[in-house]
Image (cartoon, rainbow, N blue to C red):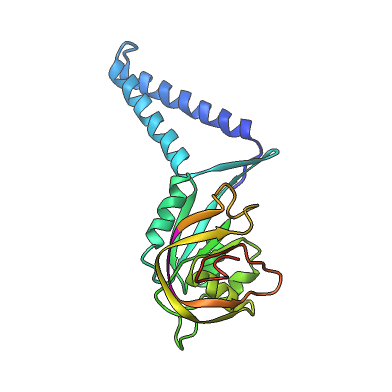
Amino acid sequence: WTTTSTSGVLSLFKLSSFILFYLIIKKSKRMNDWLYAKIYFFLLTLFINFKNIYFRKLNFGEIIIIEKILILDFGSQYTQIIARKIRSCKVFAEIHPFNIALSKIKEINPSAIILSGSPSSVLQKNAPMPVREIFELDVPILGICYGMQLLAHFLSGKVDNAAKREYGQATLKILDDSDLFLGLNAATSVWMSHGDALKKIPEDFEVIAKTANSPIAAI
């Protein structure tokens, strides 16, 4: 959703507020009736909070872009937590099953896509898979755990059974903090849960974090 300018949106918002206030006062017939004034400010507060909670505005010159994150759920127990953390940043997030149709994804028109974790393995016969065309949509894609392995699997990387399953607390050593891990400590405590591991990264990718048990923990 775009608009011609930031000032245009603010002017429209102010105009709508004054019209609402005028209609309430006119209906009350009593300028000193604070009940109607309270109703007005209550409705106004609701509107402002709704706007702030569900939309985050990015200003690029005269254009406002509303971000929308699509989360594809592959059965992870943490999918709801992922969505909640995104929404706490005041960014809109939707959860959909992994096998959502490509036409529906295009209709949602996400700013980015997140591939969740899963108890499944990309190596098993009937592993949950999204439509391959999501990698041709020209939007950023973040794969978490199974999602990262899935991304590598689709892009000609190699996933295999890990020599040692990893479950529980681990220390993530960040090798590149210029973007994805910007602002995090070089050694960060994380929670790991996986039986497979990435053995070969896809072309044009680079390793940006590792643990003692996973030399390729993030790409």
Q: Is residue 143 left or right of residue 136?
A: left
x and y, in percent, of residue 121 in the image:
45, 80
Taking the image as drawn, is residue 145 in sight? yes
Task: Tell me which secondary structure the magenta stretch mostly adopts.
Answer: strand
Residue 109 visible to an observer of this rendering:
no
Residue at left offset 62%, top offset 30%: 7
Q: Position of residue 151 (x, y in %)?
A: 57, 72
Which residue occupies the foreground of this view, 191 or 106? 191
Q: Quadrant of residue 111?
A: bottom right
| Image position, residue 24 (x, y; %) | 36, 23
Left or right: 24 in relation to 137? left
**Left or right relative to 181: residue 118:** left
The residues colored magenta run: 190-194
Residue 45 position (above or below residue 190):
above
Residue 198 against residue 126 in the figure, above or below: above
Q: Is residue 68 magenta?
A: no
Camera-side residue: 178 or 98? 178
